Amino acid sequence: MGDFLQSELEKAQQCLLETYELAESYGDNEEKDKSKYLQLMEQICQIRKDAIRNEDALKVAMEERTIADFESVFQGTIKRAEKNVQAKKTREYKAFSDRLEDISRSASGEILPSTTNKDGALIEMDMQVNINDPITKKRMIDPVKNINCGHIYERTSIQDAIQIKPKLRCPVAGCGNNQYINMAHLKSDNALKLHLQRIAKTQTTIWCTTLTV
């Protein structure tokens, strides 16, 4: 899948999260309806799956020597792949659903539950948004989003990077945003921050449990 499409889908996902966060704070019951956001996320996942499927089919069909064979192989490959496309079962969809739940619980003042699998291992749902800062490669604590391209960085690392190089473009590989970053372009990503806090809390719980065993 192309970098541009991937970037646009990431921005769409982030926009949905921010809209839901605003709805939880200021919206009515209809605007807080998670099913609407999940339906839109399902469409985003479907677009991503379709793009990957079409690229794979194109690679296979390119080996044919005639237009007729190319079309036949291309269409056949797509039809076979369609049976495996179930957007609701993707990791991205499930992670998005978890993020909506985090926002909802935070808005209502509930304590977030630990997230572990049956073996007690931490589950990290990055929802195609890397939970590690693209500059330091370390897990973020205070994430900020570039409003021009949707990519996310750790606040302190992007601040330091801008001070070192005032004419700094988005450091994420493949980003098509050519604007120089300044602090006015950066907005706190509260939904991701909440998610990171949940991960940190779960890891601490597991670590403490391990020490007492």
Image: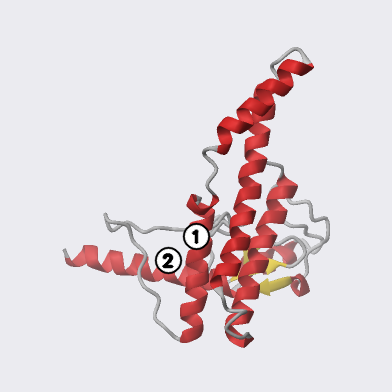
Q: Nearer the viewer, residue 119 or 45?
A: 45
Specify the quadrant of the image occupied by residue 166.
Answer: bottom right
At label 1, the amino acid type is Ala
- Rendered location of residue 74, percent (x, y): 68, 26
- Rendered location of residue 3, percent (x, y): 71, 46
Q: Which residue: 52% across, 47% down?
A: 86
Q: Dot 1: what SS?
A: helix
Dots 1, 2 in contact, CB < 8 A: no
Q: Earlier in the sequence, mark 1 or mark 2?
A: 1
Q: Which residue is mark 1?
A: 95
Q: Is residue 171 visible?
A: no
Q: Is residue 28 above or below residue 145?
A: below
Q: Nearer the viewer, residue 211 or 175?
A: 175
- Rendered location of residue 82, percent (x, y): 58, 38
CA distance separating discs 1 and 2: 13 Å
- Rendered location of residue 20, percent (x, y): 61, 75
* Residue 199, disc: 2
Q: Dot 2: what SS?
A: helix
At label 2, the amino acid type is Ile
Q: Is disc 2 surrounded by few (<14), some (14 to 19) or many (20+) residues within 10 Å?
A: some
